[in-house]
Image: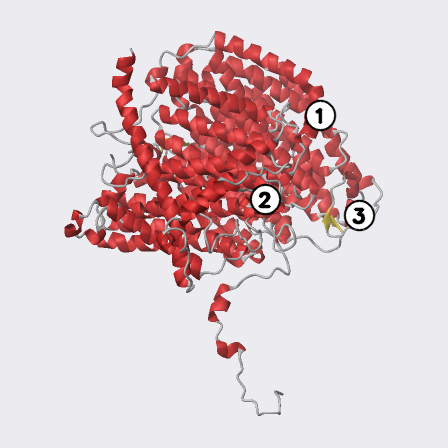
Amino acid sequence: MMMELWNLYGMQTLMMLLHMVVLLVSVLLGVAYLSYFERKIMGAMQMRQGPNTVGPFGLLQPFADALKLISKETIIPSQSNRAVFVLAPIVFTTLALLAWSVIPVNAQWVLADINVGILFLFAVSSMSVYGVIMAGWASNSKYAFLGGMRSASQMVSYEVSMGLVIVTVILCVGSMNLSDIVTAPRPWWMQILLFPMLIIFLVSILAETNRAPFDLPEGESELSGGFMVEYSAATFVLFFLSEYANMILMSAITVVLFLGGWLPPFGIEALSIVPGVIWFVLKICLILFFFVWCRATFPRYRYDQLMRLGWKIFLPFSLLWVVVVAGTLIMMDAVP
Amino acid sequence: MTSFQWQSLVPILPEITMAVGAMALLMVGVFRGDKSAQLLNILSIGLLLTVLGLILGITPFTLTTLNNALITDSFSQFGKAVIAVGLMAALLLSHRDLREGVMGRFEFPVLVLLSGIGMMLMVSANNFLSLYVALELQSFPLYVLAALRRDNAQSAEAGVKYFILGALSSGFLLFGISLLYGFAGTLDFSLLAGTLMQNGAVPGAVIGMVFVLTGLAFKISAVPFHMWTPDVYQGAPTIVTSLFAIVPKIAAILLFLRLLNGPFAPLTPDWIQIIIFLSIASMIWGALAGLVQQNIKRLLAYSSIGNMGYALLGVLAASPEGTASVLLYMTIYMIMTAGTFAIILSVTRHGEGVESLHGFAGLSKTSPAKAYALAALMFSMSGIPPLAGFFGKLFVFQSLLESGFYIVAVIGVVTSVVAAYYYLKIIKIMFFDEQQESFDDAPSSQARYFVAALSLAFVLFFIVNPNVLMATTRIAAQSLFG
Amino acid sequence: MLATLAFYVFSAVLIFSAAMVIVVRNPVHSVLFLILAFFNAAGLFILLGAEFIGMILVIVYVGAVAVLFLFVVMMLDISFADLRKGAVQFIPLGLFIGGVLLFQFYVLFQSWQIAPSAMLNITTPSLSGEEELTNATQLGRILYTDYVFAFQVSGLILLVAMIGAIVLTHRQRAGVLRQKVAEQVARKPSDVLEIKKVETGSGVE
């Protein structure tokens, strides 16, 4: 009986677990070094050094930070709603890592190759708002609550146009499977047609991950940290970690949707000697650089400006563009 | 896959025109703001005239279209034409109030049009799915309209009450539909009728039908599902009340007729009991509760409850004659209500519409024309010959007697005598009571006088040539039994 | 076997959280349990092979509708305990009505029967059988062909809901300063700046 079960599920499960561990470790390492590179790049842009003392070139700085935070005391405010307070960072982190299960890192390199991968990603990313809103509410603090509310309305608003962007891509490739989205042929006119959507998507993911210039939920200068204000030590680490994991995830989604995933750039065959994973990571790094660049460049948006951009510019434009893309596809007789 | 057939859209051309027109008007309103409300209102009336032309222009063959979702026949054609006329009357009545202030919203005509599409689709629904979506499309704008004067607590209450009870009734309807689907495995009216015919009155199907009828009884406010009506009529802005009173119930009654004589025809012995109860209860309660009302809108609400009772009497006969009598009754009732509201809306004091019953005291002195017109309409409502209202009731009772419902007919006559009391009370107040405070001198809008004049002319001169309308209703009723 | 296990887990959590929605005192907890219930319902859909509906359930209900619920519940600050106080006196009445309904349903489903021709009536949507179609494709093919009418009218209903929400809540407030981007962009230095050569000691007039 046990042998049968082992033969049926055991090996498979073990391999699955191994894949998961590899993926998670890479994501976490990615998070660690994203924070390092962010500080380095910001430093360079502001003519500073950035972290440079811990380890060679400060390379061990992320680990030093993590160790420091974990070894501190976790403070739970006495007036807070304890269960939800603790649950919030857990939910946030789980969701940030859960989405990775459908991202294809290379041809066939994906944990779950499901038919509705893009919907899964969209669902998970739309749920990550709960971590924030729960944290904001459970902290029982005005700053945290304001941050939570801001983040909820911001994420819901920008999800609308993100959804429409995804619809245009699905229209072009005719599948919701992420691997199919990467490999589907895209003629030059389709690339041009999708370019405005790429811009909208890039701006929307900034808002979706609460990054500058849309970091109103945190807004350290007005809300002194927003929904995270009451979190410390390990719970704070979870938030920090999942925020950066979300950034990498969103970059990965952008790469899958628009930049051709693991395929070599510009369809140059000669470049395919370099493994697909490398291209995938390089492309992600490109988008991540954009994240950091934005943070170093733009001042924070005002709240009404944020809402105006989302509802009055992005939403009508992406709605219009869905029609344009659908019309063009029919005109070119390229409906997949 | 078969390619799309454009011809399949021809039968619902009026609704498509209306939907496209409503959306175009919405865009005009969005860019031009609330100051364009009256312009949109005129354009909406123009659109409705076009739609009426299309409705009458399409030859009434019995056709089903869009995968049997809709049916068009003389019955639906008649219904749609009456609804279009009713909507035009409602829009004409509201024209003046849209000029400015809280009611000066450009969304008003657009919402009325959208609700109108729902009503028109309701009368040509051919399966439960299209029935449900059309019913919701009809109801949603009405919920919004009831709460349109949102700063007024009564209006907001009316909106919320209407919405919650409407949602509840939709729940009943859906539950009934699901039971019917569970029994027959189909939502299609004719297939359901066939299945019921084969199997007779199975408990599941009967209970499903009861729930469906309950859901619809909410929409026509038949007792005991009438609780929302007085509050909504009183709370909603008067122009919206006039819309409620004039149009939606026609669509719902026509839906009753189509359902009871179509898919539920095999269950006739079962639904007859329900309809008898609904109609008797509505007639009695409409007559008795109306006696003590002090607010004219509330009074008209009870009057409409009672009138729905009479309309349902005609449904009982389950014959072409009965159906024709219901169609005639509803048309006459609609026209009388439009006239009544036109006059009520045009009687103002300090710029506000008069709502209290005693506020009408002395109307015959200051504006005798309005008083006499309202008196004629009230006489007609109470069914005094030779006015139109009398014929409406006459044909209903006639069809009832032909089918042998003597006791019900007697109850109907008695309640109609009781109800006559409050119609006559309005006349008495107008003509014989002392005036408390003077009415506004400024004449009301031309559009209202126009509606009132048309309605009055119809009521007075219906007797001259009743055959045109009666023949039309008979053809429409025939097509239902075809 | 795994699927069966998953089914029982999803159903058990679904029923548990649905019960908790009405049992817990804190309304925010209620909404959170509601979200959990939605989530498990989506799981059940996926087990049924309806992955598209499952995902859409999560996106629409969890991602959008429940967020707004949570929003409202958090903002309202209603003491639900106070609301419940009055409800206690209606419990006997509620139990009575519930009992009667339960009895009626018992009687109804005792004698429940399905029409023999029901199976014939059930219309299987006409899908070409050669190819393996995904959920989304199948739904799309039915929705845009056989049920296009209901689909379009639903669209109109949503339009009405949107208009209604705007009509009932949108107010033009006087005295609100709004950003006019076009004006800001169109502003040139020459419109607002005046550069003057000032003689030493004379000042600007």
User: Which numbered disc, 3 or 2, marks the residue closer to the eye?
Assistant: 2
Specify whether C188 is left or right of B276.
left
Check disc 3 and give the amino acid type: Lys
Check disc 2 and give the amino acid type: Phe
Relative depth, front residue between C140 and B417: C140
Read off the chain for label 1. C
Relative depth, front residue between A336 and C2: C2
Q: Position of residue A108 (x, y in %)?
A: 23, 36
Q: Which residue is mark 1?
A: C85
User: Which numbered disc, 3 or 1, marks the residue closer to the eye?
Assistant: 1
Q: Which mark is residue A145?
A: 2
Q: Which mark is residue B365?
A: 3
Relative depth, front residue between B463 and A228: A228
Q: Position of residue B275 (x, y in %)?
A: 57, 19
Q: Is residue B321 visible?
A: no
Read off the chain for label 2. A
Read off the chain for label 3. B
Q: Is residue C5 visible?
A: yes
How crowded is the residue under tag 3: few (<14 C-alpha within 10 Å), some, or many (20+)?
some
User: Which numbered disc, 1 or 2, marks the residue closer to the eye?
Assistant: 2
